[in-house]
Image (cartoon, rainbow, N blue to C red):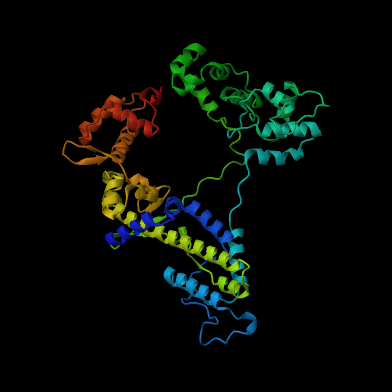
């Protein structure tokens, strides 16, 4: 994993001196998915950019500059200004040196590739409100009720709750924001809370019994009522008075107030856990994030190979379509200037992509050169590493490292991790070695997993066990901070009765 330090230093210097420095840094910071979107945007906006297909042959396309090609006819003869401009653009092509051009078989293929790229762009998933508005068609509603139903649906939050009082929604239906049309016209009867509740009941009949609940308590109550268990005494007491105690695991207090045993309270809580606190979760919503690793780390013959995933950023190239445009250009019509600007924009974008690849490649090699212990032993082998160390090793500014790893992932033999995961502080052990924060957190998680649920370890106990077992001396408050970062509840909340 040897790094080309002089190459990196030159590249970083180019970034700092380029008039497009800000845009280049933005390209560097983009995640794989965001970069795909940006590439598709550039392909749509710039007709002189095109996808480079795998296996395409090198070399330019035959044209009238090729001595073997037939001489141009009078209809397509270029004047001296156009020829000079073409020579300048061809220098751009040589400077790009992507080696990916192939013989053109017709400009229609370029349009086909762009249409294919646009067609393969995934559609945006519908939101909760959009899904349910479509389902209103199966309800027998009047025109007024349908308008009220749509307004209620657009009032839902991501959980499927309506946190605004129905009294306020009734007013908003008749008194909209400036510039908006009222849901109910001035000639219609005023909207009442009872009317909204009736419409909401209709919506619940085709979706979820708790849709439109105001809070968690009402959400659970509506589901229990739909199950015919709304009057069950213990469940009613818990939902009405003890949701905070449930969160803090204060089962004895619930049992004492309800006059029931701990086992009965546990059975009731098991029933409540089957209910859905977010009734809108099953309808539409935002698509789950898909992780596309930029960096691939593989074990090859006992060593580790670090490389970039080429599929994460498809190869682009400069299209030769500009030559056809220049042939048809007339003096003074502005076409030549327009072509020049598009070509310059394409060249800058291709250069920014190349800089992104080179920077990310160098930084990835530096990271895994330092974190080889992680590749061999997992989290236990993760060593403390600061971004400044990698910046000094690669020869770039620390801000470049920060931008390069932002939103990027690495696929390793130990799993897929964010690149930022490999930058961590450390704790000095009694032996003098330094354990990373990630490894200390893992040890805390292991101690909690192995504890007696009836007598869980306090943060002070965890600190003592770390010192006794692993010779790691940290303060109780540090254990508390790491435990909270791991989303591990306190000892009182972990206790099982």
In the rendering, at what x and y percent does residue 139 appear?
77, 36
Q: Quadrant of residue 274?
A: top right
User: Looking at the image, which is closer to me, 278 or 291?
Assistant: 291
In the rendering, at what x and y percent does residue 393 appear?
26, 53
17 vs 210, left or right, is: left
Inspect this view and state whether residue 97 appears. Answer: no
Residue at point 67% right, 41% down? 130
Residue at point 48% right, 62% down? 314
192 vs 415, left or right, is: right
Determine whether 238 is above or below 418 in the image.
above
User: Looking at the image, which is closer to me, 376 or 446?
Assistant: 376
Quadrant occupied by the N terminus? bottom left
Residue at point 57% right, 87% down? 71
Q: Quadrant of residue 111?
A: bottom right
Q: Quadrant of residue 480?
A: top left
Inspect this view and state whether residue 242 appears. Answer: yes
Quadrant occupied by the C terminus? top left
């Amino acid at each position: 994993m040897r790094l080309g330090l002089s190459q990196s230093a030159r590249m970083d210097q180019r970034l700092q001196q380029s008039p497009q420095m800000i845009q280049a840094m933005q390209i560097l910071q983009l995640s794989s998915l965001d970069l795909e979107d940006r590439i598709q945007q550039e392909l749509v906006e710039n007709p002189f950019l095109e996808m480079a297909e795998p296996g395409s042959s090198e070399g330019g396309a035959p044209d009238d500059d090729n001595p073997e090609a037939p001489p141009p006819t009078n209809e397509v003869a270029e004047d001296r200004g156009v020829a000079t401009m073409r020579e300048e653009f061809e220098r751009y092509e040589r400077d790009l040196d992507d080696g990916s051009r192939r013989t053109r078989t017709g400009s229609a293929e370029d349009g086909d590739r762009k249409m294919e790229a646009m067609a393969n762009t995934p559609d945006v998933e519908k939101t909760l409100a959009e899904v349910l508005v479509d389902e209103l068609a199966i309800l027998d509603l009047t025109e007024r009720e349908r308008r009220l139903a749509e307004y209620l649906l657009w009032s839902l939050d991501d959980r499927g709750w309506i946190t605004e009082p129905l009294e306020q929604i009734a007013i908003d239906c008749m008194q909209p924001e400036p510039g908006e049309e009222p849901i109910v016209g001035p000639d219609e009867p005023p909207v009442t809370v009872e009317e909204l509740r009736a419409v909401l009941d209709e919506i619940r009949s085709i979706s979820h019994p708790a849709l439109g609940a105001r809070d968690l308590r009402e959400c659970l109550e509506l589901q229990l009522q739909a199950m015919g268990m709304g009057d069950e005494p213990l469940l009613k007491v818990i939902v009405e008075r003890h949701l905070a105690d449930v969160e803090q695991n204060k089962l004895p207090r619930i049992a004492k107030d309800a006059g029931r045993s701990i086992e009965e309270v546990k059975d009731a809580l098991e029933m409540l856990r089957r209910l859905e606190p977010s009734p809108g979760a099953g309808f539409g919503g935002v698509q789950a994030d898909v992780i596309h690793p930029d960096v691939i780390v593989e074990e090859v013959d006992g060593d580790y190979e670090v490389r970039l995933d080429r599929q994460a950023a498809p190869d682009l190239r400069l299209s030769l379509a500009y030559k056809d445009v220049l042939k048809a250009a007339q003096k003074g019509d502005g076409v030549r200037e327009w072509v020049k600007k598009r070509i310059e924009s394409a060249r800058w974008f291709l250069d920014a992509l190349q800089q992104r690849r080179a920077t990310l490649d160098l930084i990835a090699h530096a990271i895994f050169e330092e974190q080889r212990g992680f590749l061999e032993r997992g989290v236990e082998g993760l060593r403390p590493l600061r971004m400044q160390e990698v910046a000094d090793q690669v020869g770039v500014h620390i801000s470049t490292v920060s931008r390069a790893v932002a939103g990027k992932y690495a696929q390793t033999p130990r799993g897929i991790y964010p690149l930022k995961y490999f930058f961590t502080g450390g704790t000095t052990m009694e032996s003098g070695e330094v354990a990373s924060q990630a490894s200390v957190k893992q040890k805390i998680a292991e101690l909690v997993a192995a504890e007696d649920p009836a007598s869980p370890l306090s943060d002070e106990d965890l600190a003592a066990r770390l010192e006794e077992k692993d010779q790691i001396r940290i303060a109780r408050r540090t254990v508390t901070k790491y435990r909270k970062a791991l989303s591990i509840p306190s000892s009182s909340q972990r206790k099982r009765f």
